[in-house]
Amino acid sequence: MGKVNQFTPADHKIVTSAVSEAEKSTDGEIVTIVTGESDHYGDVAWAISGIVALTALLVISLFPETYLTTIDWLAGGWSGITALPYWALFVFTALKFFGTRLILIWKPLLFLLIPSPIKKARVRKRAISLFRVSTDHRTVGRTGILLYLSMREHRAEIVADEAIVEKVEPAIWGDAMIALIDLVRARKPGEGMAEAVRQMGIVLSEHFPKSDQNPNELPDRLIEL
């Protein structure tokens, strides 16, 4: 995945400070990760290219006269073609397929065409994968929680360890997510992450208040992929 550049050193400092401050009042361990995109979506690009090519082929089969007229006009009225040969259909379809795939190398257009449910599923999948690597079962009390932000998809996820899941309903994190997304849209991603962390800390302190013997088991720093 491509590394994002929207987070400045100051943003990193703000988020790291917010995590350290939030963990002063809770045994919960907050991990923050930001990435440029959660997937390359190559399979989606190929699928879109296939749909475009098949649609073009369908249009030709339904309205062959239009294409024959165009060919005849380009030939100055001397083409003599009364039906499109199979090889011409194959070439036309292949050009549509590979031409579309080439155009979709431009990520802004590709991301504009990717259905929202696919983006949501890929971001969630990536968040869970990173949670398992960075957070899952890495704390004594199973109190790790991941705040994950995927910039190109404009989506964020919160994934929590089993002890937190048992006590905190997913909807409780709604305010933290809204604060994060609103500030990211305002081009303040660092402040957004920090505000989300602060609100997560409030929730965690209610259910997992700070105990005397609880070391800092996970890094406080913002991880940028």
Image (cartoon, helix red, strand yellow):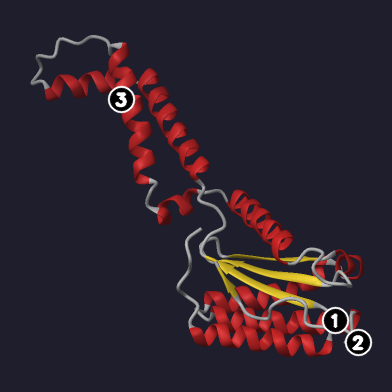
- Tell me the element at label 2: loop
Q: Where 95 sits versus 220, above or below?
A: above
The type of residue carrying mark 2 is Ser
The first of marks 3 and 2 along the sequence is 3
Q: Where 153 sits versus 190, above or below?
A: above
Cα–Cα span, label 3 and label 1: 63 Å
- Tell me the element at label 3: helix
What residue lies at 11% left-to-right and 20% top-to-bottom?
75
Image depth: mark 3 or mark 2 in front: 2
Q: Name the residue under label 2.
A: 211
Left/right placement of residue 126 relative to residue 72 reads right
Say the numbered circle drawn on residue 164: none
Q: Mark 3 points at which residue?
A: 92
- Relative depth, front residue between 79 and 190: 190
Quadrant location of residue 149? bottom right
The type of residue carrying mark 1 is Asp
Q: Name the residue under label 1.
A: 27
Cα–Cα span, label 3 and label 2: 69 Å
Left/right placement of residue 149 relative to residue 6 reads right
Callout 1–callout 2 Cβ contact below 8 Å:
yes
The type of residue carrying mark 3 is Phe
Judge the density around disc 1: few (<14), some (14-19), many (≥20) Cα neighbours within 10 Å: many
What residue lies at 82% left-to-right and 78% top-to-bottom?
28
